[in-house]
Amino acid sequence: MSENTSMEEAISKFVESLEEEQKNDRLLESNNTKETYINEDTEEYYEDIILEEKCPIGDNLDKVEKIKNFVKKIVALVTDSEVSEVTYDEESGKINIYGRDLGIAIGKNGKNMEAIEYIFNLYIKRKDLSEKAITIDIKDYKKKKYETIKNMALKMAGKVVKEQKKIILKPMPSHERKIIHDVLSENKEVETRSKNKEPYRRIIIYPLKEK
């Protein structure tokens, strides 16, 4: 990525490329020798002849390698950092990426990582590499973030119980609010409610005695 190309530009260009493919190329009919598509912009049909020597997607091992390689490709697109390890748990649908200087791939509050995950899932859906969406974590960012939010929620809940006063938390994205709701759902002394609309939606923790 050149110095003049921002993270947002690189991601935007990649997303536009994949979405344009999905928009223009729709599979109408296929067999073992050819595929017929329609171009929605021109309403013209054309055929993409599949060469006999073209390799199929292959078994699960091949899919795993394709998935790992594409993750590396995306990270290389948006950062000059080198990925040293990619782990993929096919059962849980989780990918973990490790390497040096991957901060830009994570981005502020994980925003760049979310964009990478979005791009990646566009690709695997188009290529039929996975039947379900895959989540991506870089250097255990999500795992550490979960623990941070969990500990904060428990601390705030303890304060609410002690002081018997509600606490209003700062606005958070939906996946972070869900962590708090889930963590405190087993606490019989408090309850959580969400208030306001995005992007200002936040959680309020109430003592159960307060109505």
Image (cartoon, rainbow, N blue to C red):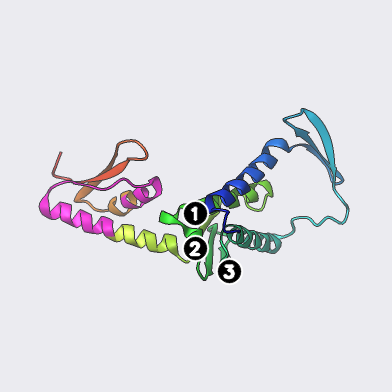
Q: Earlier in the sequence, mark 3 or mark 1?
A: 3
Please tell me how crowded label 3 is: few (under 14), some (14-19), or many (20+) other residues with Cα within 10 Å: some
Residue 90 in percent (x, y) is at 58, 60
The earlier-in-sequence mark between 2 and 3 is 3
- In the rendered image, which residue does mark 2 sit on? 138
Q: Nearer the viewer, residue 176 or 59?
A: 176
Please give left or right for residue 161 compared with residue 153 in the image. left
**Numbered disc 3: secondary structure:** loop
Report helix, strand or loop for mark 2.
strand
In this view, the mark in front (2 or 3):
3
Residue type of the residue flagged with mark 3: Glu
Residue 143, label in figure: none
Residue type, mark 2 in image: Ile
Q: Give the magenta range.
A: 152-180
Q: Residue furthest front?
A: 4
Q: Nearer the viewer, residue 105 or 7?
A: 7
Label 1: how many Cα within 10 Å (few below 14, some 14–19, many 20+): some
Give the percent coordinates (x, y) of residue 100: 52, 71
> Gap between marks 3 and 1, in whole Å?
16 Å
Q: Which residue is mark 1?
A: 112
Q: Residue type at mark 1?
A: Asn
| Residue labelled with disc 3 | 82
Location of the C terminus by quadrant is top left
Q: Is residue 89 left or right of residue 199?
A: right
> Residue at horizontal 13%, vertical 44%?
209
